[in-house]
Image: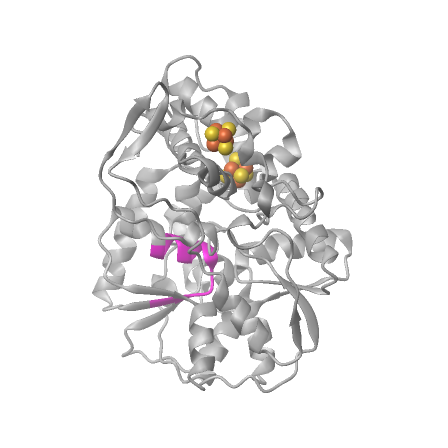
Amino acid sequence: MTLSELEKMMDSCVRCSKCKFLPGIMVKSKEFSSICPSIDRYNFHAYSGGGKVIMANALHKGRIEFTEEMLDVLYRCTNCGACEVVCKFFFELEPNEIIHELRVAAVEAGVGPMSNHKKFIEQVDSVHNPYGEPTDKRTSWLTDDIELDERSDTIFFAGCTASYRREEIAKATVRILNAAKEGFKMLGPDEYCCGSPVYRVGDKKRALKIMQDNVERFKAQGIKRIITSCAGCYNMLKVEYPRFVETDFEVIHTSQLMESLISEGRLKLTNEVPLKVTYHDPCHLGRMAEPYEPWEGELVEVITLVYMHDPPKPIRRGANGVYDAPRNVLKLIPGIELVEMERIREYAYCCGAGAGVKSQYPDFALSTSGKRIEEAESTGATALVSTCPFCSTNFKDKLKELDDPMEFYDLTELVLKSIGGSE
Ligand code: SF4
Ligand code: SF4
């Protein structure tokens, strides 16, 4: 949607500031009652979801123009979607969508994204990953003993971060798939970035081209099913791609696949893993992973500045993300005790890395992961577990900076331990 199409929605923001906090009935403590990493760090209203809605509306109506300061506020946001889930608890606004469209407008006006974003976009263009790593090294972590089935119509799409920065997740995933005799192949150097980093910083035109090219590549290879261990890739392939391009493949996250394989008896969790853990819901596997339901209609003004969708629009509240599969798998690992943080599922607090924040504002990314680690430690857990390589990097970086004894694991690493495997 364009800012023009979102105008009525932007007009109906009542500036209530509810998008800065958990809905009251979800609050368990003052300490962990906030929901927006950007407002937590920078305090001024402009940094909140609602603040950026006002900014977008003012720009759209020609009352302000893009300035360096405004772009800086706009991009100090992880596009985590928490503001949107909370707003929809009370109203039907989509601040996260509006923030994204404001970024799209910034790119179209030639002023966005930010300098480090431009660098990683150039690298996605040239070598198909934002890290600038050589294409032929994408599967350099893959060892000879891993069995691939070149006739399979299933691929393991490792994603750029697991391929080049968090190889332990990619290695654990393929070992688990082999242990369960789940046939799959890999695209190797023909696996290109899913487009998430490009899309999230607002370069929509380029992201759409990436989506189209990837879908054509999957079709040419006869791919019917995509397994991914990355929340960002899952969100793009499962939720965003079908909004813009025709897809005919199934997308499954490793947490969902492992849950099925365990229940079918194909993965046997035999080894004790004595750990008290807490689970972090990645935004892109949680609230942002809820698919869009097709809807056509309009916002009708029922009384001045009060709008209703006609016909009623299916509201994407974030409750239908992937929440149970990772928890169910954790509970089935012998020796694991799962304790929950206060902010979970669609009300989870972001790790702080997404939507270009890690590359452009690394101090902001780390201060947010630090807040989430405090919440994790308040549960008494000694290990933090998640299901996203990008969250993994940001948590590991912060734990290292703090010299914190808390351990971090991707879910695949714990499953691998329990089935008796090692990298
Ligand atoms: S975006 Fe929603 S929750 Fe935030 S200030 Fe506006 S109406 Fe309130
Ligand atoms: S998307 Fe997340 S970081 Fe950005 S304004 Fe909304 S809650 Fe804050």
Q: Residue at x 26, y 46 (%)?
A: 244
**On the rendered structure, is 218 left or right of 120?**
left
Q: Residue at x 49, y 65 (%)?
A: 324
Viewer-side residue, 232 vs 321: 321
Does 323 lie within the magenta span? no
State the scheme by which the image is colored. Answer: one colour
Question: Which quarter of the figure is the C terminus placed in?
Answer: bottom right
In depth, the one of 38 and 105 nearer the eye is 38
The reply to whether residue 184 is in sight is: yes
Q: Position of residue 65 (x, y in %)?
A: 43, 16
Which image quadrant for residue 407? bottom right
Q: Nearer the viewer, residue 160 or 54?
A: 54
Question: Residue 6 location in percent, x, y?
Answer: 33, 29
Q: Residue at x 24, y 38 (%)?
A: 311
**Residue 145 seen in this snapshot:** no
Q: Which residues are magenta?
A: 226-238
Name the residue at the top extreme.
63
Residue 230 lies within the magenta run: yes
Answer left or right for 251 relative to 89: left
Majority SS type along the magenta span: helix
Does residue 28 lie above or below 170 as drawn? above
Residue at 55% in and 33% down:
18
Above or below residue 138? Residue 98 is above
Q: Position of residue 140 (x, y in %)?
A: 48, 69
